[in-house]
Each structure stands twice: as C-alpha cells, then as structure tokens.
Image (spheres, rainbow, N blue to C red):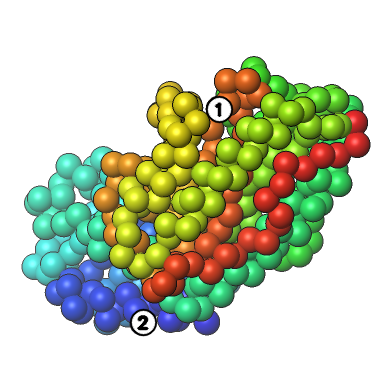
Amino acid sequence: MIADERRKRLAEAMAEEGLDALLLYGNAWQCDYLRYATDFGSLEGQALAIVRNDGQIALYLDSPLEADRAALDCPGIEIHLTRDLVGEVERALERLRNQRIGAAPQRLLPRRLAVRAADLKLGDETAFLDRLLMRKLASEIDAIRRASRLADEGYRVFMQAARPGRADYELVAETEAFFRAHGADDNFQIIGVGGVEVRGMAPPSGKRLKRGDMVTTELTPCVEGYYAQICRTLVVGEATPEQKAAHALWRESMEAGIATVRDGVTAADIARAENDVFRKHGLGQYTTSEYTRVRGHGMGLFADSKPHLLEDVTTRIEAGMALVVHPNTYHPVVGYMVLGDGVAVTKDGCELLTRTPRELFSVPG
C-alpha cells in the first residue's frame, strides 16, 4: 500500500533528522501533512496526529463520525475521540517534553499549542514534511497518473454537458457524478462562464451558458488521496478570431513552461518562462497578482500543493515531483482564460500526464 510506503519513508526520514515525534494537523480543506502519515483525510472538524519515530501513530479527532470512519480506514493507528481535542493533545505533548518534537504545518496549529511551542519544544518542521510531500515515491506518481487519466475523461464529460441554457452547476454536477462513479475520492473544481467581464473562476453560481460565452474550468479528481489537475477553455458556438489568438498565446506560454521543467531548475524558472511569453506580446501586466494567483503548482495529497510556480519562489525542482503548469489569467479583450497540463518531473525533462488536446474547444451554440 502507498500509505505503508509513506510511513516507512517518514520513519526513516525522522531518524535521519533526529526527530523523536511529529505533531501533524489537518482539516477539511488542507489535510496533506496529516494524511501523509495517517492516510486519513478529514471531512469535517479538525484532526491532530502524534507520530513517533518507532512508527506508533495516535490520531486525535473531535467528531464521532470521523472517529468511526478512521477506525475503519486506518488500521494500526490509535484513534482518540475527544471533546477537548487540543487539550488532550497538549497533555500528550507534555509527556514528550524531554524529546525532540516537530510540528507541521506550523501556520495551521491551534493557537493554544502554537503559543506554547517554545515551552513544549515544538519545532517548526514544515519544510521537512514539504520535502517528503513534494518529492514523490514511484507509487505516488502512479496514483497521480491514474488521477490524470480520470481528469482527461472527466473533461470530455464536461464538454458534453456544456450546452446553451444549462446552468454552470449542471456541468459541475455531471462531471462530479462521473468522477464518483469511477472511483474518485474527491474533486476540486471551479468554473467561469462569460466574456470580458469574467476575471476568474469560482464555485458555480447558477449562471446559464449562452452563445459566445467562454467556459473555463479546472478539474482536480483524487485517486487514493492524490489529486491531478487539468485546465481547459471552451467556447459556446464558434470561437472569435480574438479568442483564438488569445488561446494561441496561452498555449505558447504553457508549452514554454513545460519545456523548462526538469530536475535542477527552480519554480521561478518555470514561471518566468511562462510570463516571458506574455511580456513578449505586451501583456506582462496580466502575469501579476492583480490578475492571477500562480502560474502552476504541485500535485499530490492536496489540490494546491507546493511548490507554487511564481517568479519569487526559488524552490528547486527535482525528479519525482508532480506539477501542473497553467498560465491561467485575464485577457483584456476576451476575459479570463485557462490552459494547464500535469507533468511528472524527470532528470532530463518531464512526463506529460494529461493528454487532452491543447485546443480552444467549441461546442454547438
């Protein structure tokens, strides 16, 4: 099992780092640090785990339903159901005070524990976990490959659902139903419908498709806990020359970013390759935070994993990482447009994980 491989790797890494124990936090939005050790993904409430370097793991939960699910899904882990989640974990940490303990992610720790970090000798080991999360085992990359294939199939379902008069939530619902029927654990999806007035993607709002609309989406299905993402844009009816020209720029940018990916470059190198295409075409201002968030990011146990592809992120890209490269941003003539493919980093380049054609798709208007 992937979870067993991860735990073995974590125990070895903790021994090399001289860590006796780790405190890991997770919630319903971000659970990758916790899941790496426990293989438990929270659906509600908060969760904390104490992981010992001998392999012993105690998972603390404040929801009876979550505790019941953990008991079924996580054999071999101690499950503690408690109303006083933070208090019980605090007492457990006090019993470990003569040992070296790390925490991750430090920024999400409950305040009661965060303010006692020095007293409890609770070091920030977020970067330690980040290294394990970013550089994948072969079995983790295989799970992302399978999720990527599902993402490709899901986009075909999305396209078939896109018809004039339909609400955006109907497209999302059909895609979600497909993913669930084909074994996806989860799917993070946002959507945009319209023209020059659209400045980004969001959860569905009930907006109905009409002829001439651009419909953008990113699909992020999850297989065995691992997310893979694809971003594509379609037009309801025939695309205009302006839409086609904009899409050609997006494709040039994405392909420049993917061509840069290899072991030894930095996240900044990839982002800069994408952004330079926009600058070459006089659209450099649309690569800034005013119009876009990131130029891509990692894929793994969280839908928006590190490293984030930005020109000020110097994280070294290594073989074994999985990334989505997506120059998603606003165009002043046609509106918000997206295009993104997933890749697995190799020594000499990368393996393309998503196979959907890099087209500006059209559906009958």
Q: Give the camera-side residue of 116 and 348.
A: 348
Q: Which mark is residue 8?
A: 2
Say left or right for 14 vs 299. Answer: left
Residue plotted at (25% across, 63% down): 128
Report if residue 111 is visible in the image: yes
Determine whether 277 is above or below 178 in the image: above
Image x and y of residue 14, in percent: 23, 74
Comes first in the chain, label 2 or label 1 = 2
Report if residue 86 is visible in the image: no
Dividing the picture into quadrants, the one containing residue 339 is: top right
| Location of mark 1 (residue) | 330
The amino acid on which the numbered mark 2 sits, given as a three-letter code, is Lys
**For numbered disc 1, what is the local secondary structure?**
strand
In the rendered structure, are the residues bearing label 2 and label 1 in contact, judged by CB atoms less than 8 Å apart? no
Residue plotted at (45% across, 44% down): 274
Residue plotted at (64% across, 69% down): 146
Q: Give the camera-side residue of 309 and 124.
A: 309
Mark 2 surroundings: few (<14), some (14-19) or many (≥20) residues within 10 A: some
Dividing the picture into quadrants, the one containing residue 321 is: bottom left
Determine whether 360 is above or below 195 in the image: below
In space, the residues marked 2 and 1 are separated at their CA atoms by 44 Å
Q: Which mark is residue 69?
A: none
Say left or right for 18 vs 147. Answer: left
Q: Quadrant of the C terminus?
A: top right
